[in-house]
Image: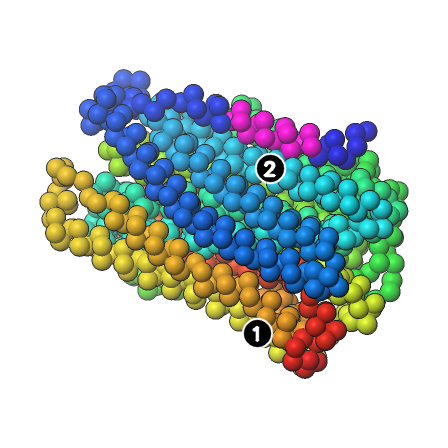
Amino acid sequence: MFSATILIIVAAAVSLVWALLQFLAISKVEIKAQPSDESTALSSGAGDEETTARLIEIYEAIYEGAESFLRAEYTICFWFVTLFSGIVLVLVMWGTGWNVPSGVFTALSFLLGALTSMASGYLGMKVAVFSNVRTTVSAQKPGWTACFNTAFRAGAVMGFALCGLGILMLYLTMLAFRIHFKAPEDWRYLTECLTGYGLGGSVIAMFGRVGGGIYTKAADVGADLVGKVVHGIPEDDPRNPATIADNVGDNVGDVAGMGSDLFGSFAESTCAALVIGSSIGVSGGWDAMVFPIIVSGIGIFVCLLASFIATDLKPVKGESQVEEALKIQLISTTVLMIPAVYFAAASYLPDSFDLKATVGDDIFTIKPWMATVCVIMGAVGGLIIGLITEYYTSHSYSPVREVANSCKTGAATNMIYGIALGYKSAIIPVLVLAVVIYGSFTMCDMYGVALAAIGFLSNLATGLTIDVYGPVCDNAGGIAEMAELDPSVREKTDALDAAGNTTAAIGKGFAIGSAALVSLALFGAFVTRIRFASNDELFADGVNMLEPLTFAFLIVGGMVPFAFAAMTMKSVGLAAMEMVMEVQRQFDEKPHLLDENPTERPDYDACIAISTKASLKEMVAPGAMVIFTPLLTGIFFGVTAVSGLLVGSLIASVQLAISMSNSGGAWDNAKKYIEKQPAESELKGKGSDIHKAAVVGDTVGDPFKDTSGPALNIVMKLMAVLSLVFADTFFAINEGGGLFNLS
């Protein structure tokens, strides 16, 4: 049997090589207008140089907009990370009795995590923009296989590159730290220093998700309100000044931001499992301790094999097969992970090993099959949550069709039905999470919860593939509309995008579920570190929620997600209002822009500038609130207050994130369902008053599902991992009582 080091490094290398091969396959698609079927050319002069030039012009405009935004955003992030790494260095050193190696290694891993997260987001943006126009070109070809495979491979580049890069950087950092922490007894300090890696990834994810989310939804809402609702022009119509900004937003928010988010989940879940299970290294050796990373490495091979089902073994040949192909990916990878994890556990874990309980003095004796069950519970729980999310957000099922029918009586009833759907959709996922937490905690204590979180993310490469697929198809449709290609091309990309909307919602369900387990595991690691630092003076019998300070901050923690959601929603609203006024100004000053065939183009750059400026300005306050709330709570009020804060934030964030994401997804697909109906049907189809009511719902749902909802994942994870990194610092202040010492 290979050593863990060989397995992990080979898995990362294979993942990166596979991503490169997928990229090369996409690059073979030439950007060139061509007939949309075997007998006819494109309606607007098709196949000619003018249409090809227009495709390239749009592609370059989207690329330049996305590139300039990410450069500006990452410049701000770079300076913040540089300054904050100094805070990490000083506070960690001070909290550990001026232990220089602990401070330096934690700050270094923080920088590496942040830089890897930025690289992941930037790479995702590059690949998505490169692939969008090629998906449009492929959609002109007869059949569905070419366009689906192009979009699917674009997602695979992101998915496998991010997983390979994340695993490689994390493991190489561990190997470098092991040069200093040679003895197995010292590996607990190694894992504690490694928590900075998860913190760095989460900080960038926060700014990426919030900044990108505000950018994309400001443009989307602005374009929809003035274009579709007021003037009745189609989505992504080239006459709409906000349409390029809208398409840029898909790449910086839905791709770059989401990539950083899921990278953060991977880093944090791995760090939590390593901290809680660090003592395994003493009895079972290095290979046993890094079992959580082995699971992620095995997952890469499973996802790679399963990807052939979609592209080769069962290629998409019709519209009805698109959603099925994506769903098969999730199901097949989950099923294949079950035997793979069992063999990994049997090969790399000792026959049994002991772990001290997070609460109390009990010793848990854990066997490989128990660890396997915990991982499988996470993987299967994630699949169930994903499928439940699909039920509530796909227009193939009754909940979304009920929302669509509610539009007959106007936008107000649409809003009522959509919000109710979101609340209702949280019930089963929360129950599934409760069962997974109870089962894994009972079997393997908090280490089991951390392994369940790893299980949620074990098929991360596939999850990311499907997540990126959606925005790529959305952009492909936008490019087809702006280039004025044959309507059949837009119909094809819309069908691909509708499936992408549903699978994106499934991906968000996975992300929310994994974030909940990751946050709980990080909280467990926080309690473990405080117990160790205090020699069991604190938290030996658990956290007492009925202590006045703890319960008070439990309520405060429950408020934080609502404050965060309010700030991000209002930010989208402010930016969208500015966008609406700019679009309307251009229509007022140049009324001929609304002509059927206008002679000049709108000023796209003005709208791009509005989204860029607004998002960079508005992302600071919500991000700062999430970062500094647990830090200041720990410094001023102590570790019991932090415990209440983390639990309250976790409980509220899960419910709110699920409901907001699913309401938004349902409104979006209800609109698409109405657009597919003929004019003589009950729902009247595109352009009707019913459709306008659906557009209003979709517009409100945009920040629900693409800004506030997904960013709430990061709220609970970032607060927990930050508390874990600064646990020793908090304890060093009045022995965990904080400056006010109220407890």
Mark 2–mark 1 Cα distance, whole angstroms, equals 37 Å
Query: In the image, is 681 to the left or to the right of 403?
Result: left
Instruction: Tell me how the rendering is colored.
Output: rainbow
Quarter of the image that includes the C terminus? bottom right
Query: In the image, is 145 to the left or to the right of 89?
Result: left
User: What residue did someone put label 2 on?
Assistant: 165
Q: Residue at x 30, y 29 (%)?
A: 56
Magenta-drawn stretch contains 11: yes
Q: Residue at x 78, y 57 (%)?
A: 445
* Res 180 visible: yes
- Give the amino acid at mark 2: Leu
Q: Main secondary structure of the magenta part?
A: helix
Q: Residue at x 59, y 51 (%)?
A: 200
The disc at residue 228 is none
Task: Specify the segment rendered in magenta.
Answer: 9-22
Contact (Cβ within 8 Å) of mark 2 with mark 1: no
Of the numbered discs 2 and 1, the one sitting upstream in the chain is 2
Estimate how packed mark 1 is, as few (under 14), some (14 to 19) or many (20 or more) residues with alpha carbons within 10 Å. Answer: some
Q: Residue at x 55, y 62 (%)?
A: 627
Position of 188 relative to 338 (above/below) = below
- Residue 73: percent from the left, percent from the top? 43, 50
Determine whether the residue tagged by mark 2 lies in a helix, strand or loop.
helix
* Res 688 visible: no
Q: Nearer the viewer, mark 2 or mark 1?
A: 2
Quarter of the image that includes the N terminus? top right
Determine whether the residue tagged by mark 1 lies in a helix, strand or loop.
helix
Magenta-drawn stretch contains 546: no
In the picture, residue 735 is in which quadrant?
Answer: bottom right
Position of 90 relative to 300 (above/below) = below
User: What residue did someone put label 1 on?
Assistant: 556
- Give the amino acid at mark 1: Val
Number of callouts in the render? 2
